[in-house]
Image: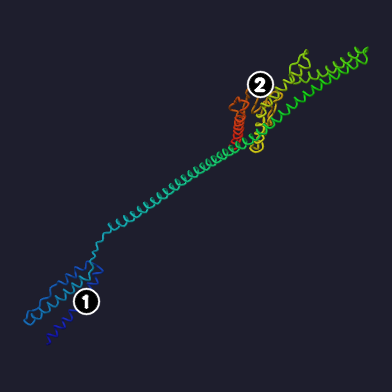
Amino acid sequence: MKKKRKIIKKKKKKKPLKVSKIKRKGKRKFKKKIKKKSFKRISRKKPRKRPFTKFKTKRTEKTKKNTKETFRKLIRLSDKLRPNIKFRFNLDKFLLNFFQNISNKIQTFKQVLQEEREKKKMEKIRLMHKEKIDSAKKLKLQKDEEFKKRLDDLKAEEKLQKHRKYDLKKFIKFEQALVRKEQAERQRRFYEKIKLEKKIEQFRKREALEIQNLEKFVLNQERENYSEVQERIEKIKQKYQAIREQKIRERIESLGIDVSDSDTRVELLEKERQFNLAREKIENTLESFYRSMASCVYQLNKKWLPKKMSLLRVIDRRYETSEIFIKSDEESDDNWLMLVYLKDNNPYANVVVEDKSNPEKNISTEYKPNEIFKFSDSLVDSLTSMIDREFRKKLN
């Protein structure tokens, strides 16, 4: 029993020692990896041989088995507790990797910085391109608006021109109706004048007859003094006749008619009558042209003339030179814009119209006396186009 107790004691002593050793070795494992091998070597040490006895052999075999099992358990436990990480440390390689990582990071930083700069540059270029496109669009829109505005102004001018032509034509037609009425009235007065002249001639004949009867009466009363009375009467007649003839001659000469000294009173009166008839015919022929010109100019001065443009005037020289012309108020009579006259001063010939309203080209056209509406249309066209040119100059 004593031996058994000793063995147990020994076992008890051995076990904590071994465990403590293992524990120490386990602690050292975490500190240093190299001491793992020493633990294995220690664990694999063979137990010391003791003197052989029968009793001892049995006991030792049991203890061996127990120790082996404990060692196995401990080894397995240590294997379980031991981490699978293997530390292989190389300083050069570590430093190389460290600086390589830093250089890689710096390189990536530089690359990112370059990319950001490129992005900013591209963004700036894109913004500049966008601004350029926007400015081009704005310019195009501005030009389109200006073009539309010009088109609207042109359409307004065309519309205005149409209204103006319509108003002028309407006014001219109305004026033509008035002209026809006035012509009829003038013709009636002319016929009344002729009738009055005939009556005056009858009165003169009656006066001559009364003088003749008076002479006969005087002759019957005083036959002795008949010759003297007759002479006096003749002298008085000749005197007054000469005065009348002189007045008629002066009047006819003032009209520009050729007069000779041998022309009698009857011939002078006939010449005057023929001249007045010709003047009357010329005036009647050009009357409708004058009326249309006057009405057109009146309407233009009233409504459609620009502010800075001077007024237009119609000058009537039908009786003096058989001419009618339109001129600017500030210009002289020679600088006319449109001239109307009869060809060769013949009342049955065509009416000649010379147009200088357009400075680039001067137009000369002939109209028949009954083509008044055609003339009024061309008159309106030429004057309105002249006013349109003035408007465009003002706009430009």
- Circles 2 and 1 in contact, beta carbons < 8 Å: no
On screen, residue 9 above or below 234: below
**Which mark is first along the chain, 1 or 2?**
1
In which quadrant will I find the N terminus? Answer: bottom left
Q: Quadrant of residue 357?
A: top right
Of 189 and 90, nearer the camera is 189
Residue at which label 2 appears: 346
x then y, percent, for residue 117: 41, 50
Of 238 and 168, nearer the camera is 238
x then y, percent, for residue 4: 12, 85
Q: Amino acid at mark 1?
A: Ser
User: Within 10 Å of the Cα at label 2, are there few (<14), some (14-19), or many (20+) other Cα atoms?
Assistant: some
Describe residue 4's horizontal placement relative to residue 116 as left or right: left
On screen, residue 380 above or below 199: below
Spatial separation of the CA atoms under disc 2 and disc 1: 160 Å
Q: Quadrant of residue 100?
A: bottom left
Describe residue 276's horizontal placement relative to residue 360 as left or right: right
User: Disc 2 or disc 1, which is closer to the eye?
Assistant: 2
Q: Residue furthest bottom?
A: 1
Tag 1, which secondary structure? helix
Residue at which label 1 appears: 20
x then y, percent, for residue 78: 20, 71
x then y, percent, for residue 203: 81, 22
Q: Amino acid at mark 2?
A: Asn
User: Within 10 Å of the Cα at label 1, are there few (<14), some (14-19), or many (20+) other Cα atoms?
Assistant: few
Tag 2, which secondary structure? loop
Q: Residue at the spot x=78%, y=24% of the render?
A: 199
Of 183 and 220, nearer the camera is 220
Of 135 and 70, nearer the camera is 135
In which quadrant will I find the C terminus? Answer: top right
